[in-house]
Amino acid sequence: MRRKILVVVGFALVGVVLFTGCSQDTPGPQSTSAPSPSASPPATRQSHDEALYVYGNYVSKAYNLRSTVASGRSSALGAWATGEALDNAVKAAAVMDEHDIRNLGFIGVRPQLVAWSPKAVSIFDCQDLSQSSTQQGEYGRAIGKVSNRFSEATLIRDPDGKWKVSKASQSPLNCKPHTDPYYWLGAQSHPSNADEEAAFAAYKRYWDLMYSLSNYPRDQWKLLIGKVAAKKPSEVALGVANDITKNDYKMSGQWRSNPIVIGTARDKIEVYDCRDDSKVNYVDRNGVVKGEFDKDTPFRALVEKDKTGTWLVVDLARVGNEVTCR
């Protein structure tokens, strides 16, 4: 069994990043476009449908949790949530009690499955908030009104085999709604404007350099990576190049990438990518294969435009943990 080498990175979101990328002008792994994936098998699809159903109930119950007496909130929401998601929702309801804040109306959910394993699934949701509002005081004005909001959740199976939401978070980015819960399984890249094109180019070039940076003179590394990345992603790429050089390894093979826009804001674009690096190897000076990489690994990235108008990858993380995409 060939050993798998993973680079553990301290991104803002907990994630595991693989050595991966390609180069157009230097030897190294080459990229290909990801094919449209097939649908899930019937038995798996049923399980995924159950997870989506649980997620929808969790959102509804959590949104209206303040209407439940404080002593009964954990048990009421516990049928749909556990761990961090349950604790955070109960705490949020307590804060609403303290400040006399209430939620009105309802949230429309449009969850889409993005990654899974037998015991966990990850979901993206472009929530419809057009019929919801948050009000402070009995006759206070509605606050925090928006139309769409991006949400991400992880569900796990409890000991009884039931799906429960274990983590949930929201993003201020505007999102693109999709009504098909399995949209992400077959979605392909279709940048809609020049900014998205530029952000995609920076994202793809970043992964190119993750492999090929060590092929350049060391004194050019920071300059090259600085054209496509900043902050932690830049540090990780430099660390990968250093490790490859130190061990005298070379990269070969093909990887597949399929970046898709999750959401946008001013000078920010968030990207989802189902990557396949299983055909990439790294070898030692004698041509002996020293490691292999994962297949169908979900990542998300934040790409920002800096003051000079250059798009840079500033955050990157694996979606979920021990889950795959297609």
Image: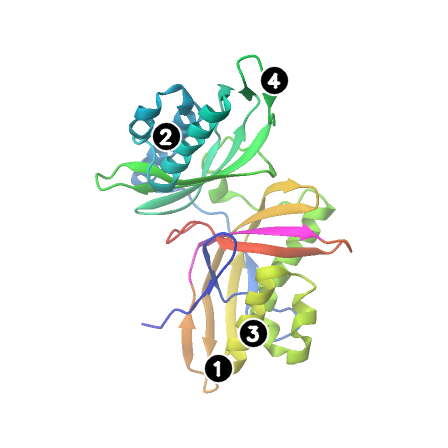
Q: Residue furthest right?
A: 308
Mark 1 vs mark 4, CA separation in Å: 62 Å
* Magenta stretch bounds: 294-305
Residue denoted by label 1: 247
Are circles 1 and 2 on residues that touch, CB within 8 Å?
Answer: no
SS for callout 1: helix
Q: Which callout, 1 or 4, points at the residue further toward the start of the chain?
A: 4
Label 3 SS: helix
Quadrant location of residue 90?
top left
Could you tell me which residue is drawn at 58 percent across and 48 percent down? 271
Q: Which residue position is annotated with label 4? A: 141
Looking at the picture, which amino acid does disc 3 mark?
A: Ala
Q: Which residue is mark 3?
A: 241
Say which label, 1 or 2, has the lower sequence index. 2
Amino acid identity at mark 2: Tyr
Nearer-N-terminus badge (3/2) = 2
267 lies left or right of 84: right
Q: Residues within 10 Å of mark 4 (few under 14, many from 20)?
A: few
* Mark 3 crowdedness (10 Å alpha carbons): few <14, some 14-19, many ≥20: many
Q: Which residue is mark 2?
A: 53
- Position above or below: 99 against 163: above
Amino acid type indicated by mark 4: Arg
Q: Locate residue 60: give its quadrant.
A: top left
3D distance between C-alphas at marks 3 and 2: 44 Å
Residue under the point 56% across and 46% down: 188
Residue 213 appears in view: yes
Crowding near the residue tagged with mark 2, few <14, some 14–19, many ≥20 C-alpha atoms within 10 Å: some
